[in-house]
Image: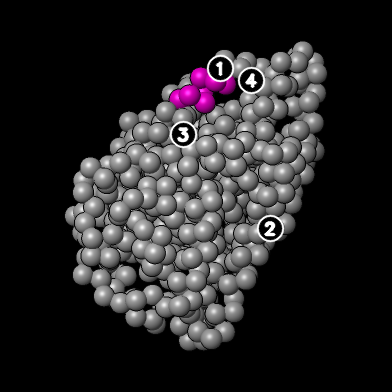
């Protein structure tokens, strides 16, 4: 008697064939993030007073994400390095990554300088910052001033003061240093103990990813709050004098992504447009929250599922969040020139190059969180000092930018995120740790990573989701096989 396949894809003999089902649109995170963004825009336009009170939704979401970013980076880096069992191999991977980051940093800073000189967004600026912006800019300048200089950077930003302090203070760079030291120590142990320790840390990471699953349910609400506040605050305001800066910045970021990263991707054997399509969910979350940190854990899972090795992903992504901030670099040089131009001054080319070289250092260690670019800009200008950037000029210049910094922060975060994803795939290719066939398949069909993403960051497909044609074919073959 012929056996008939069950509705769940199992045959009558009790065997089960996994069936990949097509998720309905309303069960996917990106759909609800889009709903949140659209709703936020509408509320910002038609109820700006209420919208001004919604910023806390996005801030709270980013705050909760920051709670687990440190542990995620620590676990991921330790597992990535220690599982190799070979420090020389890990060191080679790190050197390739840092070399790539340095080249991209120089290119991004140069593009910001070129754009600022060609379009001169601050030339002929007329207007004065409001008192609230001046006060906020003064706070940013004070913070930046305390962080300027190479030695303070090493002592205060790079090296931790205690083992648990970086986790408490959410210092990404210091957590990274601790993770590397811990991984090196574990790598020196005998294989049996090393394997058990790595397995234990992986188990802790699974718990952390479980926390992320819960937090990510709030992403659409955070996107609503962030967009409502932004549109309500600036949507109807007169930003004519600053639209040029915003347009030049976003345009420069677009050129960097499409031309520079596009060329790098092409040379590495993949298409940057397909990469952007693969990470569209994460980019939408960044648009809503203005923070690339909010999607760091998701990138770790998605890139590994796309074919990059666990070791490469675990090393490059967390390191890139401090050392490969392409959007922030564009913002730094462009913002500095804007401040000079708005003050009616001219910065000689030689001084511009010197400033860019300084920013190669000051741009490192600035995590991809809202407002970090503004603090880093203040630190860079104060470190440069001299006749071009007096303390008063820095405060006034920052006050001009601070009103639109959130809208520029989204451009920084998006560019930083795309740059780090491309960097991971490129370094994996260089290191021979990229499954190119898997990557090609995933870029052609991004749904191939859905199972891994759901397991780590989201719920399983809802009951009643429509089967794909592939699933129907699997069931049909099972029936044919059962009847033969």
Residue placed under numbered mark 3 in the picture: 425
Question: Which of 390 and 323 lies nearest the eye of the viewer?
Answer: 390
Q: Which residue occupies the foreground of this view, 256 or 466?
A: 256
Q: Which residues are magenta?
A: 90-96
**Sequence-first tag of 1 and 2:** 2
> Could you tell which of marks 4 and 3 lies nearer the N-terminus?
4
- The label on residue 64 is 2
- Label whose residue precedes the other's in the sequence (3 or 1): 1
How dense is the environment of label 4, judged by Cα within 10 Å: few (below 14), some, or many (20 and up)?
Answer: some
Q: Residue at x 52, y 37 (%)?
A: 151
Q: Secondary structure at mark 3?
A: helix
Distance from Cα at disc 4 to Cα at disc 1: 8 Å
Q: Earlier in the sequence, mark 4 or mark 1?
A: 4
Q: Secondary structure at mark 1?
A: helix
Name the spot of residue 23 as percent of width and height, x first: 59, 56
**Residue 89, label in figure:** 1
Location of the C terminus (image quadrant): top right
Task: Give the labeled residue for mark 4.
Answer: 84
């Amino acid at each position: 008697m012929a056996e008939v396949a069950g509705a769940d894809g199992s045959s009558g003999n009790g065997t089960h064939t996994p069936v990949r089902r097509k998720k309905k649109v309303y069960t996917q995170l990106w759909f609800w993030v889009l709903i949140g963004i659209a709703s936020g825009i509408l509320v910002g336009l038609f109820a700006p007073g209420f919208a001004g009170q919604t910023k806390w939704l996005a801030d709270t979401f980013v705050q909760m994400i920051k709670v687990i970013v440190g542990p995620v980076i620590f676990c991921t880096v330790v597992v990535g390095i220690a599982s190799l069992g070979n420090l020389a191999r890990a060191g080679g991977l790190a050197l390739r990554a840092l070399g790539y980051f340095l080249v991209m940093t120089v290119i991004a800073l140069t593009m910001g300088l070129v754009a600022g000189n060609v379009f001169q967004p601050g030339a002929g600026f007329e207007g004065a910052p409001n008192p609230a912006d001046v006060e906020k800019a003064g706070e940013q300048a004070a913070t930046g001033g305390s962080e300027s200089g190479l030695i303070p950077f090493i002592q205060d930003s790079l090296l931790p003061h205690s083992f648990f302090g970086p986790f408490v203070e959410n210092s990404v760079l210091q957590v990274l240093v601790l993770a590397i030291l811990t991984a090196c120590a574990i790598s020196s142990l005998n294989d049996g103990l090393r394997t058990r320790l790595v397995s234990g840390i992986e188990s802790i990471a699974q718990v952390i990813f479980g926390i992320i699953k819960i937090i990510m349910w709030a992403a659409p609400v955070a996107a609503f709050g962030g967009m409502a506040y932004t549109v309500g605050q600036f949507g109807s305001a007169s930003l004519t004098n600053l639209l040029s800066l915003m347009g030049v910045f976003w345009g420069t970021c677009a050129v960097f992504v499409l031309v520079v990263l596009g060329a790098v991707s092409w040379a590495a054997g993949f298409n940057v447009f397909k990469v952007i399509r693969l990470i569209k969910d994460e980019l939408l979350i960044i648009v809503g929250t203005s923070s690339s940190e909010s999607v760091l854990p998701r990138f770790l899972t998605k890139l590994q599922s796309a074919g990059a090795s666990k070791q490469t992903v675990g090393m490059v992504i967390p390191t890139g969040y401090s050392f490969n901030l392409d959007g922030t670099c564009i913002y730094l040089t462009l913002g500095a020139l804007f401040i000079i131009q708005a003050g009616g001054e001219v910065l000689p080319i030689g001084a511009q190059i010197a400033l860019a070289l300084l920013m190669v250092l000051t741009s490192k260690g600035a995590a991809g969180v809202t407002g970090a670019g503004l603090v880093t800009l203040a630190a860079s200008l104060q470190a440069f000092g001299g006749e071009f950037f007096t303390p008063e000029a820095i405060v006034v210049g920052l006050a001009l930018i601070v009103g639109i910094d959130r809208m520029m922060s989204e451009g920084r975060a998006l560019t930083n995120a795309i740059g780090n994803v491309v960097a991971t795939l490129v370094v994996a290719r260089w290191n021979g740790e990229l499954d190119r066939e898997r990557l090609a398949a995933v870029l052609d069909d991004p749904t191939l990573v859905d199972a891994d993403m759901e397991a780590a960051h989201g719920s399983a497909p809802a009951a009643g989701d429509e089967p794909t044609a592939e699933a129907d074919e699997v069931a049909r073959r099972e029936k044919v096989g059962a009847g033969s």
